[in-house]
Image (cartoon, grey):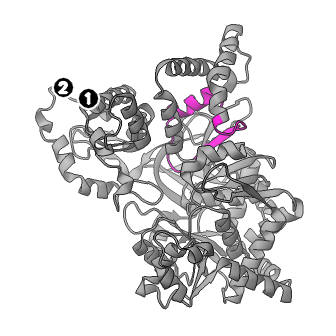
Amino acid sequence: MTTDTLAIRDELLSRSARNLGDMLRRRVDQTPDATAFLYPENNASGPEKWTPLTWREVQDRAHDIAAGLLDLGLGPEQRVAICADTSVWWILTDLGIGCAGGATTTVYGNSQPEDVEYILTSSESRIYVAQNSAQAAKVEHSSALDELVTHIILVDDDRLIQGAPGSDRRLVAEDTRVISLADLSARGHAARQADPGAVQRVIDATAPDHLATLIYTSGTTGKPKGVELTHQSWTYMGVAMESWDPLEPGDLQYLWLPLAHVFGKCLIAVQMTIGFSSAVDGRVERIVTGMGEVHPTFMCGVPRIFEKVRAKVITSRGLARTISSWAFRVGERTAPYRLEDRPLPARLSGQQLLAEKLVFSKLKQAMGGRLRMMICGGAKLSPQIQRWFFAAGIPVVEGYGATETSAIAFFNVPKKGRFGPRFGTAGPVCPGCEARIAEDGEVLVRGPIVARGYHELPEKTAETFTDGWYHTGDIGHFDELNYLVVTERKRDLIKTSGGKYIAPQKVETTLMANCPYLSQAVVLGEGHKFAVALLTLDREALFKWAENHGHAGDSYEKLTQLPEIRRSIQRFVDVANSRLDRWETVKRFAILDHELDGQKGLVTESQKVRRDQVRKRYKKEIEELYADEQTASREDPER
């Protein structure tokens, strides 16, 4: 470690809070009456009414929940599982767990009952917070959890009263373990009235190295592993992002990301440190509508969100398409000037003003009109898509990390003299942390953001964390500015029969960036002469195409198999191939008549493809793509 890195680390550690409860306390001391969160009333029709919560109100509610949990017997570092979709109640409950000295076990709201059973058993979570009675039933139907789970806290008790699709009202009503979050909070409030300093004493006793969060990884190659993140993981990430300086106290975030995922969870710690506000709504279908209602200044997302926005614009027809294509060509020509903050030539300046008026202003207005930045994580974003958004005046900055690094280990923030991201890179390493490339090309990271290990898996912990270095499993290199460029997952590299290596995620990213109709692409080719792909099509884009081409009313399954659709996809694949090295190109593809996320076991809750399962499930389709492999082409495709 260099002297400078050590000095930065020591300075950031001295600034960071002791734990999550202390972080919240500091925020309330600084800006008690500032808006912390906006949350919707979930109006069935028409615009939402967004209700504000101040930081003082957040702390009061979190402390009520904390006191209620302490009254239930929660002890230091004991786990409380949350199975719910993203909402302000998720955040308040998580903060309550942290203030009580416990640790949150995150569970995706769409997890299958067997996955919930595995995670709760592995984590030994004795208290289970369920969004509604349908989520509660995932535990109540499990005999394996009868003795383990002592309390079930129901967040949305209105559904218990009114009934809800998929809920089991009788079972919930009869289960004596069930208590509503409202009742738990009332119980905690009464306990705080009797002993006002109880929660504060627990916060003061919670050490930085105590377990704060247990997040189970996606499990693309096996059973999920519980990643242990301490209070220091989050408090250090907060001050590190503050020192990176991409965000300001006056910002408003639109937060929709799953809080069960490390990316979403990280944003809460960052928010408490910097003090900006967040509008919280986990309904993916309402992202654009919600942004139009609250007018955020930034939003974090995954590549698929940005791909869909771009696809919607570039698949427009007629005059609108002609004008938007011209505008984006103008925007691309202005990019070098804007990146270096140089004045535009007179003619280009006039074209830019017209492009802004006709196209870019409308795109920005559709997303609230105040966006100054978007942040992408979770997977690699195509530089082509980054450039497209930058052409419109909306910088998309990319970060890179993992659950094991508290989400963000690298971040592509603009540096002095540059007024936009460095496209195609993940940026420099987190302040006060170290990174290096191993002999085999693997990216290694060390620092306060790194997890303390895997829960109850000492051998896997020793294998993955050596001398404080976390082995990411990703292949990459540093460019001339020491920005990280990630190329592929180490275990996913494809070796062809000719000895060439193909990075499937690079090829998939290129396909997704160049074909606006795709929703998923899985590239295969291990041991074969060339690469092939299984493709799925985006429903919204496909039905829009059908309306414009005389196929309105046709089913999704029928549309995917139309010859004209295949010809259209082939043209896009050809364009993508032109951007790849010869041995990487996709020679053949199959269009599936269904999307992978609707097939159990093929994708994780965070939408990562389980490649081994895909190969098994579609063995026949893959074999057909390679049916005449040896005689398919006289020209060597690997050359």
Please give the label number shown on residue 35.
none
For the residue pair 576 and 544, the one nearer the viewer reads as 544
For the residue pair 168 and 387, the one nearer the viewer reads as 168
Q: Position of residue 413 (x, y in %)?
A: 67, 40
On screen, residue 596 above or below 100: above
Q: Position of residue 252 (x, y in %)?
A: 74, 48
Residue at left offset 70%, top offset 14%: 349
- Residue sitting farthest toward the top: 347
Please give the label number shown on residue 635.
2
Task: Tell me if mark 1 has few (under 14), some (14-19) or many (20+) residues whose alpha carbon lies within 10 angstroms of its own.
Answer: few
* Nearer to us: label 1 or label 2: 2
Q: Amino acid at mark 2?
A: Glu
What range of the chain is rendered magenta?
366-394
Task: Tell me if mark 2 has few (under 14), some (14-19) or many (20+) residues whose alpha carbon lies within 10 angstroms of its own.
Answer: few
Q: Is 482 left, or right, of 53 in this rendering? A: left
Please give the label number shown on residue 639.
1
For the residue pair 410 and 523, the one nearer the viewer reads as 523
